Amino acid sequence: MKVQEVSELATVRSRALAGNPERPIPFHLPSVPDVEGFLADARTIIESGRLSEGPYVRELERRLSSWVGNRDVVAVSNCSDGLIASLSIAAPRGAEVIIPGFTYLATWQALTWAGMTPVVADVDDRGLLRPEAVADALTSRTAAVVAVHVAGTMAPMAALRAVTERAGIALVADGAHAVGAHDGTFPAGSIGDFEVFSIGATKQVAAGEGGYVAVGNPQQVPALRQWALQGHEPGSMDVIGPGMNLRLAELTAALALRQLDGLDAQLARRQLIHERYVSGLGSLPMRLSGPRATERSAHKDQLVWVDDPRDREPLRDALASARIGTKPYYDRAVPDLTAFVGRVASVDQSRALASRSFAIPIHARLVDDDVDRIVDVFQSFYAAR
């Protein structure tokens, strides 16, 4: 599907729905792929008897390679497991690994499952890991840094790469939000030693569950595939190292492949929605997540950072009353999670962002009337103050 076709579809839907201002606006809806083509794929897969790790998975890996700078790609069962495997290859158990204080709990959980010690370093005003904070947090026990691409915008990977190269440690990226993101020079997936992405249910390529890892060093691909096969090589049951079951289903790969065909158009539609939000909300006491002029965000989510944290929950209540879905994002910095164990190097900005943030809809199936309704709720809320 081309960009123009997506825009025309949004216009048609907008006209069709304009007479129903009470309709719910869900936080997320997946973009509908070629359903008939997928059903044909499903029949082919089922009749073949090969339900996982077959030709559709290999084709998905091949297609995704072009989105990550033509690096090797290994498909995995989900992003979290891909992070555990990547970290286990990149760093020894017991080592310190630096992560941002503003991220989803899965980043921290992956470290705990890999047997490593999280070290929290602070972020900038967009929630992206600060290279200076990383440099200050380094110790002789530091073995890796995990950057996080937030809401579809890339972390400063080139600057972080410079820090990790000087320290002689690995750079891993949690790219769950960043399928299709670009920093103006490099695409997401093309800089870190391992960059792990998601094709889960709420992502740009929404295949239900699943993920993939872009691998910087081709010599580490066999180790990652071994991990994905529970520690053995294909065709052998002799375990030669650690591993888990990270196999991706063929049906999942087929669904993802059908959505890749429309990914450029979907990202373009998300960017137009973001621009409409900026136009409607830019004068209000808040900031929006999004790219700088030279960047392309994948706009997995649209974050709102209200100036006054006391406005956050009343605003979410007002949006809920208007039948508009929202999501907390993230209402606690990593060190404030109940089960957190690790070292805190710096966290002030992460805590400030967490206290003021939530997310509003930005999926490609939103129509212009939907966006305007959401903007109206914000404007009415602040006009009544």
Image: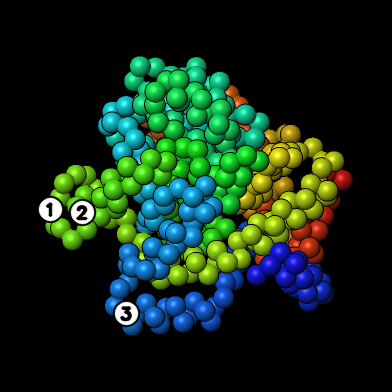
Which quadrant would residue 22 be assigned to in this image? bottom right
Q: CA distance from mark 3 to mark 2?
A: 23 Å
Name the N-terminal-most of marks 1 and 2: 2
User: Residue most toward the right?
Assistant: 383
Residue ID for mark 1: 238
Q: Horizontal and vertical percent for residue 121?
A: 50, 25
- Amino acid under disc 2: Glu
Q: In the image, which disc is placed on residue 233?
A: 2
Picture colour scheme: rainbow
Is residue 300 rendered to the left or right of residue 376? left
Name the N-terminal-most of marks 3 and 2: 3
* Residue at 47 percent of width and 80 percent of height: 39
Q: In the image, which disc is placed on residue 48?
A: 3
Q: Horizontal and vertical percent for residue 350?
A: 57, 30
Mark 1 Cα-neighbour bin, 10 Å: few <14, some 14–19, many ≥20: few
Element type where label 1 sits in the image: loop
Along the line of sight, the residue nearer the viewer: 338 or 231: 231
User: Residue most toward the left?
Assistant: 238
* Residue at 64 percent of width and 50 percent of height: 299
Quadrant where the N terminus sits is: bottom right
Element type where label 3 sits in the image: helix
Q: CA distance from mark 3 to mark 1?
A: 27 Å
